[in-house]
């Protein structure tokens, strides 16, 4: 009976520790194969991760290296603090576009965050099930609509309407662009927020109701704070789309390099100016380098905003 | 293991069969190739028309045409992105504002007539050169100053690099500078954008080439002369230019055949004329 044990042990080589412990003598046995395939898979994973970082680094370096050439002809202060962008006459002030991008993104977020959170609350907390099952796919489809379609609708429907409403002769500008962008990012933000709100455990709601809270208090004091990090994530995604959006913006912003004195004055942002001009400029010109620099600034702004939101999210996380 | 080997072999056999088949057809067809055209949006209407006709005759030739303003044409040819760069001026020579492109050959293809256009709600039908200069430089800002009703003028300009802009500035404004700022000023990227903007913006003025003029906008006479083919041919209307296809060196193969097709009298006096361009032979 006792001498049975060693033989049963040797018949169970499938256990990892057991099989690793012994070698059959051949060079390419199970142990070696396992180690080799594990190593290979690890290398592929590390390689993929490094590749992504490398791509990001390459883009940053390329944009910066080409962009920095601007400053051999233009002073830093002119580029960053002058609003006079007139490259045909050697004026390269990009402040208008930088401020434009910041203003456009903030305005878009200002309009879209409240609306999309309310949509998400409505979807997750109040809708009957059949309507929810109808609305969710609709929102998913909205995410997939190409931006040029939004831009075209903005140009042909929104702008004439804004023109009548505001009394301006030309309603292209920040407001038109931010409304178009809002419509574009609404589905993204509300759909992801909706998922985040739905993921809040029901016991939170039950507890709130048990303490005598009404529905409004439950949603705004308990459910939304609990879903905060998911909503923040949705906002980051929406913001990233808003900052980088080009086609829709270029059709409704007016493309004029001037600081707007109202929301209805034609102006330009980083993306719209780059796409309007990059194909028209000579390869080795200050103008071209200036556009690359603007691309780099755009990248830097979006990275900074994402980092800022992450920090905010961490700070907020402590209270939830 | 064996299964995917089998399917792989099947795919390889299929590919080699198709390849063999296509090379057999290729021997029969005299022309094959890929033509990429970029550049002037003013010339795009006849480029598209010619491309569809040419493809019917030579089904093996692929043509893709797009437009983002004249200067993009020679630039993408020089960078090797496009085979043909459509441009509204002779880009192998220096013109005001643009250096010549060395090594590119200019093939004249059509005569383009440019015109000032306005939204139909504008009550003005003709402007003098001086009035146009004042409007496009921002000196005159109300239609009543040029004989229209009391409404602010919305100026729509093409972006830098547009051939329509170059021609209009040189020939309609006598080289006078455009404005570049203002509440009622905007720039658009192509002739198509210009068309949409003029059609949908009350009190707007802009400029475009004749093929784009629709019933939803009005072509303005300059100094009392209407922008028509007749007035160009009798020399009274000056705002026109020759459109060129720029190629890297002399064109060859499918590109050469395509350019020759456009230059042929059949296309020049047929489709080209129908689109409101003027045949090259008519003005020479």
Image: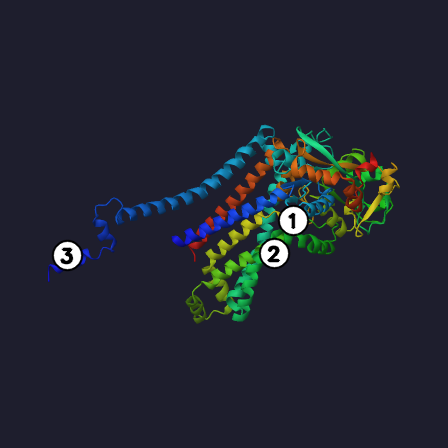
Residue B278 disc label: none
Which residue is labeled 3 in the image?
A6
Camera-side mark, 3 or 2: 3
Quadrant where the N terminus of chain A is found in the figure: bottom left
Which residue is labeled 1 in the image?
A174
Q: Is residue A265 visible?
A: no
B219 left or right of A269 in image: right
- Towards the viewer: A205 or A256: A256
Q: Position of residue B136 (x, y in %)?
A: 78, 40
Whichever of labels 3 and 2 marks the residue nearer the N terminus, that label is 3
Residue A183 disc label: 2
- Vertical arrangement, residue A174 with respect to residue B69, above or below: below
The chain holding disc 1 is A
- Vertical arrangement, residue B171 with respect to residue B274, above or below: above
Residue A40 location, quadrant? top left
Secondary structure beneath label 2: helix
Q: Farthest residue toward the left?
A: A2
The chain holding disc 2 is A
Q: Are marks 1 and 2 on the same chain?
A: yes
Residue A296 location, quadrant? top right
**Residue at 48%, 61% in the rendered image:** A195
């Amino acid at each position: 009976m006792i001498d049975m044990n060693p033989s049963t042990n040797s018949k169970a080589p499938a256990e990892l520790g057991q099989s690793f412990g012994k070698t059959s003598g051949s060079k390419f046995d199970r142990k070696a194969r396992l180690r080799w395939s594990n190593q290979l898979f690890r290398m592929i994973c590390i390689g993929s991760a490094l590749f992504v970082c490398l791509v990001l680094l390459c883009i940053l370096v390329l944009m910066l290296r080409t962009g920095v050439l601007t400053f051999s002809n233009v002073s830093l202060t002119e580029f960053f603090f002058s609003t006079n962008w007139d490259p045909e006459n050697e004026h390269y002030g990009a402040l208008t576009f930088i401020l434009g991008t910041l203003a456009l993104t903030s305005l878009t977020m200002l309009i879209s965050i409240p609306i999309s959170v309310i949509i998400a609350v409505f979807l997750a907390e109040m809708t009957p099930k059949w309507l929810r099952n109808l609305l969710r796919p609709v929102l998913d489809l909205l995410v997939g609509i190409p931006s040029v379609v939004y831009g075209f609708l903005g140009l042909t429907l929104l702008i004439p309407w804004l023109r009548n409403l505001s009394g301006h002769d030309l309603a292209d500008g920040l407001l038109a662009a931010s409304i178009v962008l809002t419509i574009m990012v609404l589905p993204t933000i509300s759909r992801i927020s909706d998922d985040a709100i739905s993921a809040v455990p029901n016991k939170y709601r039950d507890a709130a109701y048990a303490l005598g809270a009404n529905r409004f208090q439950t949603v705004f004091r308990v459910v939304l704070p609990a879903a905060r990090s998911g909503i923040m994530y949705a906002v980051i995604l929406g913001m990233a789309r808003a900052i980088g959006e080009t086609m829709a913006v270029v059709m409704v912003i007016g493309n004029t390099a001037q600081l707007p004195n109202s929301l209805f004055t034609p102006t330009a942002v980083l993306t719209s100016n780059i796409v309007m001009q990059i194909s028209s400029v000579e390869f080795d010109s200050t103008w071209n380098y200036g556009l690359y620099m603007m691309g780099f600034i755009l990248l830097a702004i979006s990275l900074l905003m994402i980092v800022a939101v992450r920090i905010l999210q961490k700070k907020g996380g402590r209270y939830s | 293991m064996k299964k995917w080997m089998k399917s792989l072999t099947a795919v390889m056999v299929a590919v080699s069969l198709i390849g063999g088949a296509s090379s057999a057809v290729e021997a029969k067809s005299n022309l094959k190739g890929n033509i990429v055209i970029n550049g002037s949006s003013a010339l795009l209407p006849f480029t598209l028309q010619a491309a569809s006709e040419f493809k019917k005759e030579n089904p093996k030739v692929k043509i893709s045409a797009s437009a983002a303003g004249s200067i993009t044409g020679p630039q993408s040819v020089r960078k090797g992105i496009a085979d043909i760069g459509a441009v509204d001026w002779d880009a192998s020579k220096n013109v005001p504002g643009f250096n010549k492109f060395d090594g590119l050959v200019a093939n004249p293809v059509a005569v383009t007539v440019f015109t000032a256009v306005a939204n139909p709600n504008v009550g003005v039908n003709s402007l003098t050169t001086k009035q146009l200069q004042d409007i496009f430089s921002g000196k005159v800002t109300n239609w009543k100053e040029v004989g229209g009703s009391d409404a602010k003028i919305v100026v729509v300009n093409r972006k830098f690099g547009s051939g329509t802009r170059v021609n209009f500035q040189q020939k309609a404004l006598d080289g006078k500078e455009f404005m570049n700022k203002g509440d009622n000023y905007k720039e658009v990227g192509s002739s198509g954008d210009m068309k949409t903007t003029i059609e949908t913006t009350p009190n707007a003025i802009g400029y475009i080439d004749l093929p784009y003029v629709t019933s939803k906008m009005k072509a303005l006479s300059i100094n009392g002369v209407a922008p028509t083919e007749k007035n160009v041919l009798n020399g009274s209307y000056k705002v026109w230019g020759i459109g060129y296809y720029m190629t890297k060196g002399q064109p060859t193969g499918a590109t050469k055949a395509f350019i020759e097709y456009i230059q042929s009298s059949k296309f020049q006096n047929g489709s080209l004329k129908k689109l409101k361009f003027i045949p090259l032979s008519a003005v020479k």
